[in-house]
Amino acid sequence: MTRWEPNGRGRLELAALALYGERGFENTTVAEIAALAGLTERTFFRHFADKREVLFSGADALHELLVSNVAAAPDSTGPIDAVGAALEAAGGLLQERREYARRRAAIIAANAELRERELIKLASLASAIADALRRRGIADPAASLSAEAGIAVFRIAFERWVDETNQRDLPELIRDSLDELKAVTAGK
Amino acid sequence: MTRWEPNGRGRLELAALALYGERGFENTTVAEIAALAGLTERTFFRHFADKREVLFSGADALHELLVSNVAAAPDSTGPIDAVGAALEAAGGLLQERREYARRRAAIIAANAELRERELIKLASLASAIADALRRRGIADPAASLSAEAGIAVFRIAFERWVDETNQRDLPELIRDSLDELKAVTAGK
């Protein structure tokens, strides 16, 4: 029996998040995720390579948003500010799914394999940003330093954002962290 | 039969490096490493948890050197320069084993599992540096930003250093990369 499945992908993501949060990533099976989403395992694997990838399916959109925003920055914008603006745009995207992002972050923090995957994802974002800067004519090491420093700014802003006590928006925290980095490197 | 083994650890490291370089990390066994080093597998496992760890055995020394150098920086030194000085000291240690470090880097670059392990090692160094800065009374986010930015500087200097065409020393490249980061964040 085949039927049309409205937003199967989104339902699978939410089901996975609920189960990982409830019983841990390790103790959840694809069959259970599919059942909670009201879909088949086969449908799960049409969307995701494995149960880990459900948590990283947003990476491509983030990648594209960062690269296109770096490319779109005005010519007069220096590399670190082009990266900062791109990160703020990415922060805006994540801000729209704050609760999802927070739960996801807690699940990732609780599992070594997922933490590794997240580090790899961030490293590959840094390298995509560096490539985008080079296409703007920025030479190395300025291109890679701006990209790596930008990812450092993003990570720290993100950690502050997912903190339970935080009330501020991610784009604002990103802007703040970049200003703080500028102050720190200026010896202030 | 038990006999005294002068520098068994160092011999195992060199044997592993030779075999990983020659036939790849995946295609090398602990038995082969031990045989090339003239030691038993049992001795190998007295020194290293597995064949991956042979390549990461220097991490503890690096960790300690970074943390103690951050702690030892003069009170008047700002966080990013305390981190810079610590990284230069670590660079000096690596410089003494340039050929080893270069071969090791090539082996790591060729294997996804090893690249992941390296990323995790760098992330844990960043977090140790941030802790050392907090013990100097530096608040967050300045502490974590300085640490993360420092590791970014280190990575980029290291990449330049292992490049075949490079003739410069690692501490100098670290100094240069930090200056470049300062210039980039100052909008220069």
Image (cartoon, coloured by chain):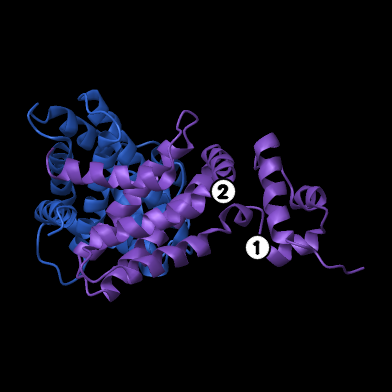
Chain colours: A purple, B blue
Q: Which of A115 and B3 is in front in this view?
A: A115
Residue type highlighted by circle 2:
Arg
In the rendered image, the quadrant that contains the N terminus of chain B is: top left
Quadrant that contains the C terminus of chain B: bottom left
Q: What residue type is labelled 1?
A: Ala
Image disc number at residue A97 = 2
In percent of the image, x 54 and y 47: which residue is there?
A114
Q: Is residue A35 left or right of residue B176?
A: right
Residue at 35 percent across and 52 percent down: it is A151
**Residue B67 position in % (x across, y down):** 23, 32
Q: Which of B24 and B115 is in front in this view?
A: B115
Letter of the chain that mark 1 sits on in the rendering: A
Q: Point out residue B92 in the picture as x, y percentages from the top left corner.
A: 13, 47
Residue B150's x, y, as percent? 23, 46
- Disc 2 chain ID: A
Mark 1 = which residue?
Answer: A49
For disc 2, the neighbor class at 10 Å (few under 14, some 14 to 19, many from 20) is: few
**B30 or B37: nearer the eye?**
B30
